Image: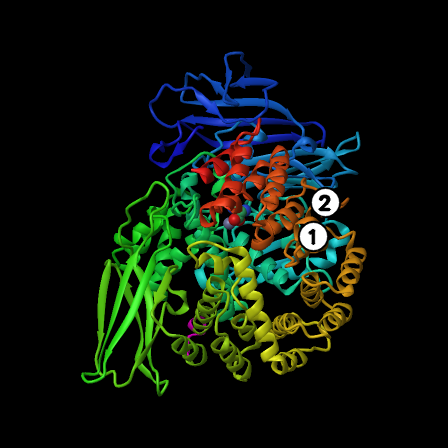
Amino acid sequence: PHVIRREDYTPPDWQVPEIALDFALDAAATSVRATLNVVRSSAHDRPLVLDGAGQTPLSVKVDGVAVNDWWLKDGGLVIPLRGSAHVIETEVEIAPERNTQLMGLYASGGNLCTQCEAEGFRRITFFPDRPDVLSVYKVHMVADKARYPVLLANGDPIAQGDLPDGRHWADWHDPFPKPSYLFALVAGDLVANRATFTTMSGRDVALGIWVRAADLAKTEHALAALQTSMAWDERVYGREYDLDVFNIVAVDDFNFGAMENKGLNIFNSRYILADADTATDYDFDAIAAVVAHEYFHNWSGNRITCRDWFQLSLKEGFTVFRDQGFSADQGSAAVKRIEDVRGLRAAQFPEDAGPLAHPIRPDEYQEISNFYTATIYNKGAEVIRMIATILGPQRFRAGTDLYFERFDGTAATCEDFVASMEAASGVDLSQFRLWYSQAGTPRVTASVAHDAGSGRATLTLSQRTPPTPGQLDKQPMVLPLKLKLFGAETAQTLAAEQLVLLDQPSEQIVFEGISERPVLSINRGFSAPVVVETDRSAADLAFLSAHDDDPFARYEAMQQLMLDTLVESAANGTADHRAVIAAIAGTLDDAALDPAFVAEVVLLPSDAFIGDQMARVDPEAIFRAREALRRDVGRSLDTRWRAAYDAAQADSFEYSPAAKGLRRLKTVALGYIAASGAADAAGLAFGQFEAADNMTDRQGALATLVSGDSPERIAALDIFYNRYSDNALVLDKWFQAQALSARDDTLEIVAELSRHRDFTLANPNRARALIGAFSVNQRAFNAADGAGYRFVADQLIALDRLNPQTAAKMIPPLGRWRRFDAARAALMRGELERIVATPGLSKDMFEQASKSLA
Ligand code: DPP
Ligand code: ZN
């Protein structure tokens, strides 16, 4: 395999300050003529090499003259040139409707659209398709006017007109030099929900969210989120929008969630379309977060882009950090932090502990598409958050201001960002830089010794980062740990919150005047993305779950209490549930708490997260332990769950933080009532399902029913299917709910669903809803006979022939074989080996599967 290494970076041989693109758009055959002004970057004699993939040029001209002195190499076009500046013209023909990879120019729902990040532009035309070549783009599009009445591209619209043959044309111009991965065009039958945003300097920006006419009513939430995020970025980061238009287009077939193309974001429709009937609260929140994320990229990504793809976290980690801050400001910051940490632990911690572990700034890759990972995005965001914590808000803002000022208009590196932070703050981040180069999740141990006589408490902290592939020895990292001591008897603060920067393998901190036994609250707010091991007893954890004044620490104490109980139960077949039950009761009884927060705190950790705590994952034992605890909590607190359920009823749907919190608690309570085995549970769930005036309640009820065996389960699935059979995004929920079911026959149901007439691997959302969801259903996927592994491998091999990028993203569950018993490990390895041996396998799949075997 061809490995690309960060240390091999060299600046581009040729720059392309300007490009003009001329498209004759047609789904079957689109002609693309490109005119590139190329400039030799230095005194070298190397030819011009333009990346390409799959095309052969129909013509090549140099300075207006057709030439034959060119050749193709690795799909790219090589042209020897004599001078220091030339005009290159090429013409190719491409077939959007045959593009199943959804990279480059493709057809979706009868419209044409593009996706170029990371290396899709080379599938449209020959070009130096790397992020450090920045060009000003002029785009001319011609298309059939009836089929494609709307023609959009980056930047500002310049002119448009009709042709005598039923076609029409449009010209767009983007004045901001940009890399090719930010190029976009859309041709389609679309309508816009429009608004105007007035920027901080008083400029009017025309906003448009473009969708099929039937979906127009579902764009209000996204449009409002766009306006809110534009104002937020001005207020919080001082960033103003820079073009006269900002368009977003929603398409159904999309590999990513969305794409930040300059002035023309293209979105997976699941992150745009919402109304109460079809979208859950989770969907509403995700839409606002992704709209904000892509908008924020206009500065952190577009105005300042990446020098090379090893720097991907420069834009993604920072932009996730920015969107997390935005979302935290829209509702409960505490709940948002809990959700983000839960997501990090579900996706990133396993990645960091497995065969695909990589630093947030990787050193090598075979296929860059495989590096759009939870590590680059979510751990990357945590690294920025730690810098913000260490610097404090004023110095952090000074650092981002300096970064934007220094590197505007350039392709920058992670190092540029860190150096800006140092320069603006005076804080030395030398050792902190290890976060960019070392993979793996650091583990911290903390214990407090108290001497009552002297009133002295000694906190001993130590850290260790486990080995990861290619990195056996790790240096100690800088870990910003917020901590505090409470009195076990009085619940008073014994030592106020302080930020400790643990940068040694081990350190002691002494507290004087500690008059009673202290209870340690550590990693408050999840100030460092680490695993903390303490010797705190169940009683201390219960105490913190009731008294800690940091909401995250309070949640964390409850999680740890639950985990300790569940791990013991999974290992021994039984455990004492009383401490967990009492702590949940105390939380439910605390009237001062926000229901949204309560709902998060009383949820048991997932099967997968329990497994992550164990030396060997035993999926059946974990499932039994968790079900037993759920049943016990459900039964013991039946009255409280019913009271919480009844208190959470609302007259009509409202999308507000308070109403969302009540809906969340309602469905969590319903889940416990069902887990208790109560005779009326299915009826209660079905009643919620039928009476619901919103998708959150309906899906919550459905999710409860699909794990059971009641007649209401079949009825609800049928009603849901019939009601939404023409809504792809809601049908995804129908597939997904069944793939996540706790039933014993889930694999049979999922295999049957894979032959359903509404199932297709061609649509990434649908493939992820069934195959992706099933493969994270720990018990069903890890069935002892290996049938789950075989089913997923079959599906991924089939998907790889259509869409390698989406297929390869679903390899990691098979790569977790080291965490399981020898029999399961052998079965998983067998499937990975079968994948690697598949003729015609993509390099995306090859890299993921072969690294997973190593
Ligand atoms: N479109 C993806 C994102 O915004 C990749 N840049 O994260
Ligand atoms: Zn992004």
* Place of residue 606 in the rendered image (x, y in percent of width and height, measured from the top left): 53, 61
Residue found 54% across the figure and 52% down from its top: 294
Q: Is residue 186 left or right of residue 395?
A: right
Q: Secondary structure at mark 2?
A: loop
Residue 386 against residue 96 in the figure, above or below? below
Q: Which residue is mark 2?
A: 759
At label 2, the amino acid type is Phe
Magenta part of the chain: 548-553
Question: Is residue 551 rendered magenta in the image?
Answer: yes
Q: Is residue 409 left or right of residue 734?
A: left
**Mark 2 neighbour density, 10 Å: few (under 14) some (14–19) many (20 or more):** some
Residue 169 against residue 191 in the figure, above or below? above
Judging depth in this view, the residue of 703 and 411 nearest the camera is 703
Residue 99 against residue 395 in the figure, above or below? above
Q: Residue furthest bottom?
A: 490
Judging depth in this view, the residue of 550 and 517 nearest the camera is 517
